[in-house]
Amino acid sequence: MIKDKPLILSIETATNICSVALSYGENILAYEECREQNSHSKMLSVLIEKLFKYTYYSLQEIDCVAVSKGPGSYTGLRIGVSTAKGIAYGLSVPLISVETLQILAYSSMQKYPDCCYMPMIDARRMEVYTAMYDKDFNVLKPISADIIDKDLYTSLHKDRKIVLCGDGAEKCKDILNNEIYIYDLATELSAKDMIHIATKKFEAKDFEDTAYFEPYYLKEFVAQKSHVKGLYD
């Protein structure tokens, strides 16, 4: 089959939702997700296999792999990126990375145009991974791990509506309650929302070095003490 647009496999594993999408240009052909907690390692390859079951294409025909690069869950990102790198290397196709927070922002842009966007990923307790973008993805606030405080973002207000979205936004509602904020709590991370950005990067040949690419963890991984009896006694 002759293709005049890129066939892209997109992988998103930065939170508890594990999702994959197959797209032809900016048209989605198939989508699969799993919401079972701590299942990324066993389900990701299963979801990818399902993508091709009811399409005209096979995995061997993809033109590139796009992966959510972080920040987010250390384990989830590691699984997603290692899988994406393995496929890209094995098929000799390019690897594209998409900032995880931009995926959330793009989703909110479709519902709330002409605003500013502050996607938030839950980083436990009252901390979130966040950044701020305008409608053209210009960075108004760089990515950081923030402990939420009622005056934290006052300097960013400037009489503009700011959309807060993602799984970290809900815990901010009682603290960041200024009328300038719009809460988009329905937006979740999805490989479907990577397609637009990934396609633009493919057209620009904005590829990663597959051998050396690593996820953007933002913070160092801290292992939690095991609660299994007999360990660390």
Image (cartoon, rainbow, N blue to C red):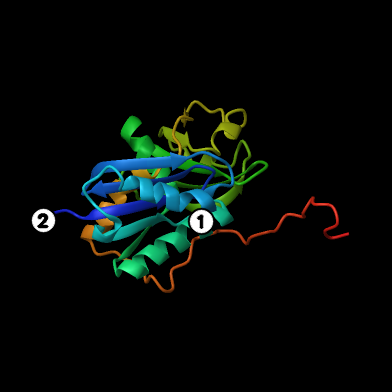
The amino acid type, in three-letter code, at marker 2 is Ile
Seen from the viewer's position, the closer of residues 59 and 219 is 59
**Quadrant showing the N terminus:** bottom left
**Quadrant showing the C terminus:** bottom right
- Spot occupied by residue 167 in the image (x, y as percentages of width and height): 53, 37
Would you place residue 205 above or below residue 112 in this image?
below
The amino acid type, in three-letter code, at marker 1 is Leu
Q: Which residue is mark 2?
A: 2
- Spot occupied by residue 232 in the image (x, y as percentages of width and height): 84, 60
- Spot occupied by residue 207 in the image (x, y as percentages of width and height): 31, 66
Asked if residue 84 can be seen in this view, the reply is yes
Residue drawn at the location 47% of the way across and 66% of the way down: 214
Q: Which residue is mark 1?
A: 77
Quadrant assignment, res 191: top left
Name the side, left or right, on which 91 lies relative to 124. left
Residue drawn at the location 80% of the way across and 52% of the way down: 228
CA–CA distance between discs 2 and 1? 34 Å
Q: Please, which residue is most extreme toward the top here? A: 179
- Spot occupied by residue 25 in the image (x, y as percentages of width and height): 21, 49
Which element is circle 1 on?
Answer: helix
Circle nearer the viewer, 2 or 1 = 2
Quadrant assignment, res 87: bottom left
Asked if residue 98 can be seen in this view, the reply is no
Seen from the viewer's position, the closer of residues 98 and 66 is 66
